[in-house]
Amino acid sequence: MRRWFVSLLVWGVVVGWGVSASAQRQLPPDVQALQKIQQMKTPAEKVTALRQFFKDYPDSRFGLTARMWLFQALAAMPQSPEAELLAAAEDYLSKVPAQIKPTALNNVAWELAKAKRALDKAKQYSEESLKLLPPNAPPDSRAAYQDTLGYIYYQQGDYETALEWFQKALSQPLENDGEIRFHLAQTHEKLNQLDEALTHYLRVAGQFFEDEHTKEAEAAYLRLGQSKGRTTEELQRELAQSKKAGRDAALQRARYEKPAPAWELPKLEGGTARMSDFAGKVVVLDWWGSWCPPCRAELPHFQALYTKYKDRVVFIGMNWEQPTTPDRVGTVKKFMADNRYDFPVVLDHDQTAGRAYGIEAFPTVFVVDRRGNILYRNIGYRPGVERLLEAQIEDALSR
């Protein structure tokens, strides 16, 4: 739930999103240096390279990114002196713009908590981040900050206080609470409250969007259940039921259920396509743009689903390129060819269909049933979305 703040534009330049090899060679030297650092395998390598980066490029516009990476690398090195680690943290935080200071403080506190380093200082950062958090902050953000503070108390062995903070975090309406709930389960186990721990481990093990805690929670559920005399078969049945409930809940959150508006748009390769052309078929519509990093992450999964289901399901990529793009059609053709995508594409460059469907962000994917009704709407990208889309497609085909 903690995400280091780097604007997508800056991050895209540094890691080379959508930049050809020849174009990357033409990037400024400081960007090329950061790209090399980003690919290094060990924290020690990164620390050495980043220190040299500050000497070589003291005025780089990516100095904040470099400072963030230096702190992260030092936190990942157990042998790094605590004074050096905290100096890197303070250097990074001193350069952070005021509007993202709460996020930066929370993320620094989280890294220290994970490393079990300078926990009193981590607590100070965490408490400050909560004080600076605006009253109207999204529930997910507030919960993440509260979870950080709870985890610091957990690492200090104050499980009662940790429990209070995890419960505060879970008291808010959250779309994804797996990490917090896992921490809560661990804390109940530390307090020997095994029934409560089992309940939360089971929920985490059954969550549809798996994370790094899902398998660990499943193993903990089996371990604790067996310690209470439960059979493996019984526990496995309960895990299967939890996973089905997690799948059903994920599908329900994406339900939309509105008539699919009609549209008529030019095809990328020529001619015209209409929504009415696909009457009686399951249709998947994906609004995307080549300029959009989340779209770039999602499109390989869209292509894979198209390859798997194209004999039974209609897939249409609803492309919108930014008006400032010199050759919008040429840009799309090149992007499709470069990535070896062959799903059908129509051009919604005037946003006529996008407005009718209420597109608010890219990518947005709709699953339409055979009667022409939207069943599901998916906004944005997150790991595991391909599993959700496949479940939605299977549901639409079963109707």
Image (cartoon, grey):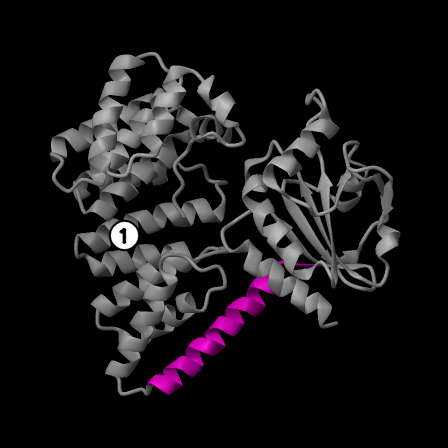
User: At 27% from the left edge and 42% from the top edge, which residue is drawn?
Assistant: 111
Q: Is residue 363 left or right of residue 179?
A: right
Q: Which is more toward the observer, 57 or 239?
A: 57
Magenta stretch: helix, strand or loop mostly: helix
User: At 33% from the left edge and 21% from the top edge, which residue is drawn?
Assistant: 95
248 drawn magenta: yes
Q: Which is more toward the observer, 71 or 329?
A: 329
* Type of amino acid under label 1: Tyr
Q: Which is more toward the observer, 193 or 208?
A: 208
Image coords of residue 387 (percent x, y):
55, 60
Residue 380 visible in the displayed image: no
- Vertical placement of residue 289 versus 19, above or below: below
Image coords of residue 342 (percent x, y):
68, 46
- Vertical placement of residue 397 versus 234, above or below: above
Q: For the image shown, how many numbered marks are present on the structure?
A: 1
Residue 371 visible in the displayed image: yes
Q: Is residue 91 left or right of residue 304?
A: left
154 drawn magenta: no
The stretch in magenta equals 232-256
Q: Specify the quadrant of the image occupied by residue 287.
A: top right
Image coords of residue 330 (percent x, y):
72, 28
Quadrant into which the C terminus falls: bottom right
Q: Is residue 185 left or right of residue 269?
A: left
Q: Residues within 10 Å of mark 1 (few under 14, many from 20)?
A: many
Q: Which residue is mark 1?
A: 151
- Vertical placement of residue 304 versus 60, above or below: below
Q: Which is more toward the observer, 133 or 140?
A: 140
User: At 18% from the left edge and 47% from the top edge, which residue is drawn?
Assistant: 116
Image coords of residue 191 (percent x, y):
21, 68
Q: Is residue 254 left or right of residue 182?
A: right
Give SS at disc 1.
Answer: helix
